[in-house]
Image (cartoon, rainbow, N blue to C red):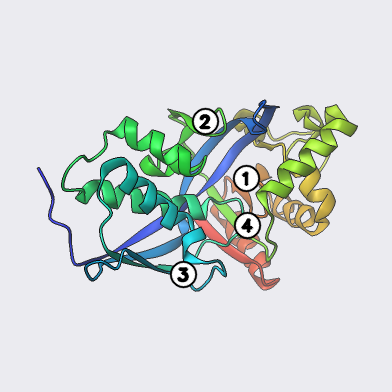
Amino acid sequence: MTITQPDSVTLRAGCKINLHLEITGVREDGYHELDTLFFPLQEPFDTITIAKGSAGTGLILNCPALSIPPEKNIIYKSWEKFGAATGWKPDLKISVEKGIPDGAGLGGGSSDAAVVLNYLNKYCPNNALSADALNKLAATIGADVPFFLNNVPAHATGIGDVLTPSDITLEGYSLVLICPDVSISTPWAFAAWDKAMLQEPSCNNKKEFLTTATSKDRKHSSRALWLFNSFEVVVYSAFPKLRAYKDKLIEFGAVGAVMSGSGSSIFALYREMEQAARAATALKAEGVATYLHHL
C-alpha cells in the first residue's frame, strides 16, 4: 500500500560511536577491511526538513554548514541513486541543519543519507526496495550508511557494510561524548595508518593500546567491551591535544575511553552518573562540545 507523501516533514538524523574499531587488512581495490561495533546515539543530531518541491525542479538542497556544491553532498547522491534504482526522483526541497560536527568520526553524513533513503523508500509510489535491496544500495553510497538505515547496535565487517545485529547493551552506564574543534579527514587517517603499519606493524596491537592512562589496566569493563581503535595511534601522534582530552576523561573515573571512527570525537563510559557529570562539566568549561548520555 502506497503511503501519501506529506507536504513537509522534519526528521532527526542521529550519530554513532564505534565501541571497537580494528583495521584488519587492506583489499586489492585499496579499501580497508574493518571489524567494528557500531552503537547509535541520539545526540548530537542533524535536523533534516524535507518538503515537496515545484514540478520539474529536481532536488533543491540547502546545507549552509558544508561549503561544498549541493551535487557533491551525500544526500544528493542518495537521491540520484535511489531514482536510478526505482525510477522515482521526486521534486524535493531538503534543508539540513548540522548538529553533528564534520570530521568527528560520528557518521553525520551517512546518517543524513540513511534518513533520506528511508524517506524515499517509504513514500515511493511504485518499486519500493526490499530491506536487502535498500541495504545494498546504501552500501554503494557510503560504508556506514547501511548501519544507519536500522540504527541499532551492530557488528560490522567488510568495509563496515556487512552487518550483524548485536545484543550489546550499555544499560546502567553514563556516557560522555566530546567533540573537540578538530576536523579529521578519514582518507588522511587511513593513509596515515597505512604508513605507520609499513614502518611498525605492531602499531595495530591491541595489547599496546589499552584504554586506560596507565600501563596496568585494572578496569575490566574496558577489556570486556574491547574499547579499541586502530586509528588512535596515528591520530594522537598528529593531534596530541586529543590524547590529552582522553586522559582527562579517564582521570574522572571512566571505566574506559576511546576515540570514535577516525576521530576526532572521543567518548568515555562511567559507572557513576556523578563522575560522568563532573567530567562533562570540566570539558565544557574548556570550551569543548560535550554530550552527556545516561544509558
Question: What is the C-alpha distance between the residues marked 2 and 3?
Answer: 29 Å
Question: What residue did someone put label 3 on?
Answer: 63
The mark nearer the N terminus, 2 or 1, is 2
Q: Callout 3: helix, strand or loop?
A: loop
Residue 295 seen in the figure: no
Question: What residue did someone put label 4 on?
Answer: 103
Q: Callout 2: helix, strand or loop?
A: strand
Residue drawn at x 77%, y 49% is 235
The mark nearer the N terminus, 4 or 1, is 4
Q: Callout 1: helix, strand or loop?
A: loop
Judged left or right of residue 78, residue 186 is: right
Q: Nearer the viewer, mark 4 or mark 1?
A: 4
Q: Position of residue 153 (x, y in %)?
A: 45, 37
Label at residue 261: 1
Question: What residue did someone put label 2 on?
Answer: 156
Q: Nearer the viewer, mark 2 or mark 3?
A: 3
Circles 2 and 1 in contact, beta carbons < 8 Å: no
Q: Amino acid at mark 2?
A: Ala
The mark nearer the N terminus, 4 or 3, is 3
Q: Position of residue 85 (x, y in %)?
A: 32, 41
Circles 4 and 3 in contact, beta carbons < 8 Å: no
Q: Amino acid at mark 1?
A: Gly
Residue 237 seen in the figure: yes
Residue drawn at x 65%, y 36% is 227
Q: Amino acid at mark 3?
A: Cys
The mark nearer the N terminus, 2 or 3, is 3
Q: Amino acid at mark 4?
A: Gly
Q: Position of residue 168 (x, y in %)?
A: 47, 32
